[in-house]
Every structure is written in C-alpha cells, then in structure tokens.
Image (tube, rainbow, N blue to C red):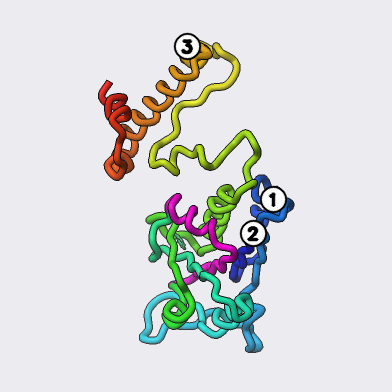
Amino acid sequence: MRVDILTIFPEMFKPLEESIIKRARDKGLLSVNVIDIREYTQDKHRKVDDYPFGGGAGMVMKPEPLFRAVENACDGENIPVVLLTPQGETFTQEHAQQLSRQERLILVCGHYEGVDERFRERIVSQEISIGDYVLTGGELPAMVLVDAVTRLLPGALGDDSSSQEDSFAEGLLEYPQYTRPRSFRDMEVPQVLLSGNHEAIRYWRRKMSLARTDKRRPDLLEKKILSPEDRKLLME
Ligand code: ADE
C-alpha cells in the first residue's frame, strides 16, 4: 500500500520510521510519502492559509495548494482522499479494515479553523475524526490511521501475533493476559492458564472477554449478536 500524507508539518512524521511501521516499510508492504503542502504554493510568502470570508476567528487553509498537491499525487488516477478533521466520522476498526484494502490512500492533515469548503466538496472522499476532542492539527490523527491500517496489512505483524485475533475486530475487549513469573508479590496467575487444558483456557478467556466488555463497554455488546454459548457465559 502507498500512503501519501499532505501536511504543513512534514517533520512531525518521524514516528512512522519506528517499530512495526518501519518493518512494514522495509518489507515493502507500505510506502509512506510525506508531502509538504507549502511546496505547492505559488506566492512569495508561500501562504497556506488565509482569513475566513465573512469574518470570525482563526484561519482557513487555502484551496489552491491543496488542489495542486492532491492532483500531483494522484497523477490522473482515482485515489481515495481522506481528510483528518474533528468533523469526520469517528474512526473505528471497521474503517481501518476498509482502508487497509486500498492500494493507495491520500491523507490530508487539516489545520486552523478548517479547509476551504471547495476542497472538501470536490476532492475529499472521506472525512475522519479520531475522537471527540480537538487537536492542534490532523498530523497525529493521520499517524493513528496509518498505524491502525498498517498492522492489518498481510505480513505486517510477526508470525506470533495476528491482527485476525484482535478481539476488537470481533467487537469484544481483550481477556486478561499474564506472563512469568507465576507468582509475583502476593498475586498468582489464574490456575486455569497453567492447566494445559486448551478447551478450559479458551472457555475462560471468552468468559473474561465478555465480562470485561459488559462492564467497560456495554455499547459494544449491544451491537453484537451473541451466540447461545456466549449468552450462557455472560450469565454465569
Ligand atoms: N484535527 C483536530 N482534531 C482532530 C481529531 N480529533 N480527529 C481528526 N483530526 C483532527
């Protein structure tokens, strides 16, 4: 997958050179192309924003550099253009899955009071927010999106971790995990995990997943159609 990121702060994208994302890039599963919107200005001051027509506080991102930067990145192809903005749909694992199936993506990091509406109307195909809070710009949200999408690319995670096992993909929270030592301070690892009984372990984990989701995120359970076994585990 190739991701082009349009930003006025290209230096902010260093985190995409670390960890699993770095590995995915090294393996050729992902290519990230950070584009400085300012390079697409044509005036002496390289202006990317201007005052809003009609007055009011804040600045608005000018349409011309944005149009030129996207048109240059697309080079005539039809590529999804995602604008990161608090006004977008709230990002979910489903969005991540859907976006991970694209061959190319163009991400546009919004700033100031927003972007000129003509760019949204003509160029943007999808607007995404990473949550109901306002950040200083779309750069961190773009990195969040790239991170969530990258780990879904086939081959991006090592053999021993699989994104298909994400409980979240299934609409449930993760069950509790333990590692060595068996006994730490006054706390023991649950006996069932040491039993070697795979069926009992699977049962316990499912039960914990369901109970945790019910307690912390009942909204997730409401959306889910539970199997008779799940319903029984939840009642126990
Ligand atoms: N830009 C500023 N805040 C944002 C958010 N919560 N999500 C996406 N883009 C943003």
The amino acid type of the residue labelled 1 equals Lys
Of marks 1 and 2, which one's residue comes earlier in the chain? 2
Q: Residue at x 44, y 68 (%)?
A: 126
Name the front one of labels 3 and 2.
3
Q: CA distance from mark 1 to mark 2?
A: 12 Å
Per the image, is 103 magenta? Answer: yes
The amino acid type of the residue labelled 2 equals Phe
User: Regarding ligand 1, which quadrant of the image does it lie in?
Assistant: bottom left
The numbered mark at residue 191 is 3
Of marks 3 and 2, which one's residue comes earlier in the chain? 2
**Which segment did they paint magenta?**
92-113
Which residue was labeled with disc 2? Answer: 13
- How crowded pointer 3 is (Cα within 10 Å; few <14, some 14-19, many 20+) is rated as few
Decide: is 211 above or below 22: above
Of marks 1 and 3, which one's residue comes earlier in the chain? 1
Which residue was labeled with disc 1? Answer: 22
The amino acid type of the residue labelled 3 equals Gln
- How crowded pointer 2 is (Cα within 10 Å; few <14, some 14-19, many 20+) is rated as some
Residue 77 vs residue 28: left or right? left
Q: CA distance from mark 1 to mark 3?
A: 38 Å
Q: Secondary structure at mark 2?
A: helix
Per the image, is 48 magenta? Answer: no
